Image (cartoon, rainbow, N blue to C red):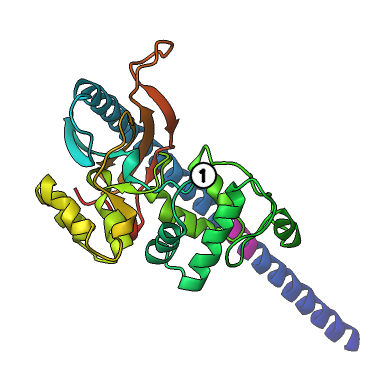
């Protein structure tokens, strides 16, 4: 009798263990199925975005080419910041034309201009902006002596374990600014739209984007008012305030470098952006009447501080 009771108990334990194993197996298989389904959905979403990006490029690239041709035809007229709308098939494309003279060149900009850019546009405190401006200057200058407040040369970069060292020369590409000690990816992404290489210490009023005018003056909406005002009154508006030292009504002669930023809205409601830098100067050895200096990958346009409002 005792033996039969023990056998029954053993059978129950075995059955219970088997049931637990089955339940664990079912749970594991469920997780595999869920993970697989999620992976398939993610792949489908990526494929959908890739197709949407390619369709966007099929409208953005022709728009950029058409605007470049128009700029060549109008080369004799005054160059200034503007936005043009093009209807290509079923797509409306907006192209923002920014002459390089309307942007900040960190190679020659004053410390005051750099600090204003870092604090008013980038959101740094006054102290942080002063330190970063000193480090930008040290990154570019040829000596190895830290200057200004919180400056940094090679020794400070090594001590901080920074992955790069000062360039000790002028920047050829604004993306090199990401190598400056203390520059964060977020800050660079915010200020990058305001940067260009033009060899000018001051920003040309007629070439400056409204967003840059707003940022440097600390007056939201001022840039749009300047753009909408008669050309003869623009200088008076910007040369009378606290940021007057940052701007100039004079345009550099012979400057023909422009940034073309093309935007299109997909059927999904997402905006896509394509940016190209061009030199419109004549080059006999070039395949096109202009020289393409750089092309940014087409990307989604999401950031509120850079939201494009055609």
Residue 123, quarter of picture: bottom left
Q: Position of residue 147 (x, y in %)?
A: 61, 60
For the stretch drawn in magenta, the main secondary structure is helix
Q: Quadrant of residue 98?
A: top left
- Residue at the spot x=67%, y=67% of the render? 24
List the residue tagged with mark 1. 175
The magenta segment is 27-32
* Left-right relation of 158 to 57: right
> What residue is rendered at 20% in x and 41% in y?
83
**In the image, is residue 258 part of the stretch drawn in magenta?**
no
Image-based side of 73 in relation to 105, left or right: left
The residue under the point 27% across, 31% down is 59
Please provide percent x and percent y for residue 90. Answer: 17, 33
Query: Callout 1: few (<14), some (14-19), or many (20+) C-alpha neighbours within 10 Å?
Result: few
- The answer to whether residue 99 is seen in the rendering is yes
213 relative position to 7: left or right = left
The one nearer the camera, 157 or 251, is 251
* Residue 112 or residue 285, whichever sits in front: 112
56 shown above or below 73:
below
Q: Position of residue 146 (x, y in %)?
A: 65, 59
Quarter assignment of residue 58: top left
Q: Residue at x 32, y 28 (%)?
A: 254
Give the number of marks: 1
Task: Say whether residue 125 is visible.
Answer: no
Farthest residue in the right direction? 3
Above or below — where is 279 with respect to 134? above
- Residue with the most extreme left position: 230
Relative image position of residue 251 (x, y in whole percent): 27, 39
- Front-lying residue, 80 or 179: 80
């Amino acid at each position: 009798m005792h033996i039969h009771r023990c056998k029954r108990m053993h059978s129950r334990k075995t059955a219970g263990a088997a049931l637990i194993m089955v339940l664990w197996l079912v749970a594991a298989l469920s997780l595999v199925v869920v993970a697989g389904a999620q992976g398939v959905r993610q792949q489908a979403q990526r494929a959908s975005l890739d197709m949407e990006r390619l369709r966007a490029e099929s409208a953005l690239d022709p728009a950029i080419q058409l605007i470049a041709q128009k700029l060549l035809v109008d080369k004799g007229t005054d160059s200034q910041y503007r936005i043009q709308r093009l209807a290509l098939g079923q797509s409306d494309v907006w192209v923002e034309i920014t002459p390089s003279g309307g942007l900040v060149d960190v190679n020659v900009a004053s410390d005051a201009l750099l600090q204003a850019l870092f604090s008013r546009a980038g959101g740094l405190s006054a102290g942080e902006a002063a330190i970063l401006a000193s480090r930008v200057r040290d990154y570019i200058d040829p000596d190895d002596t830290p200057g200004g407040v919180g400056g940094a040369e090679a020794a400070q970069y090594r001590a901080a374990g920074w992955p790069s060292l000062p360039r000790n020369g002028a920047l050829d590409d604004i993306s090199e600014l990401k190598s400056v000690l203390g520059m964060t990816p977020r800050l660079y992404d915010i200020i990058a739209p305001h940067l260009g290489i033009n060899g000018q210490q001051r920003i040309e009023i007629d070439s400056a984007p409204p967003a840059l005018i707003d940022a440097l003056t600390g007056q939201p909406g001022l840039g749009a008012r300047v753009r909408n005002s008669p050309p003869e009154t623009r200088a008076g508006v910007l040369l009378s305030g606290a940021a007057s030292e940052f701007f100039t009504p004079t345009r550099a002669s012979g400057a023909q470098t422009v940034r073309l930023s093309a935007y299109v809205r997909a059927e999904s409601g997402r905006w896509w952006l394509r940016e190209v830098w061009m030199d419109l100067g004549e080059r006999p050895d070039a395949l096109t009447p202009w020289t393409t200096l750089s092309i940014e990958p087409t990307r989604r346009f999401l950031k509120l501080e850079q939201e494009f409002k055609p």
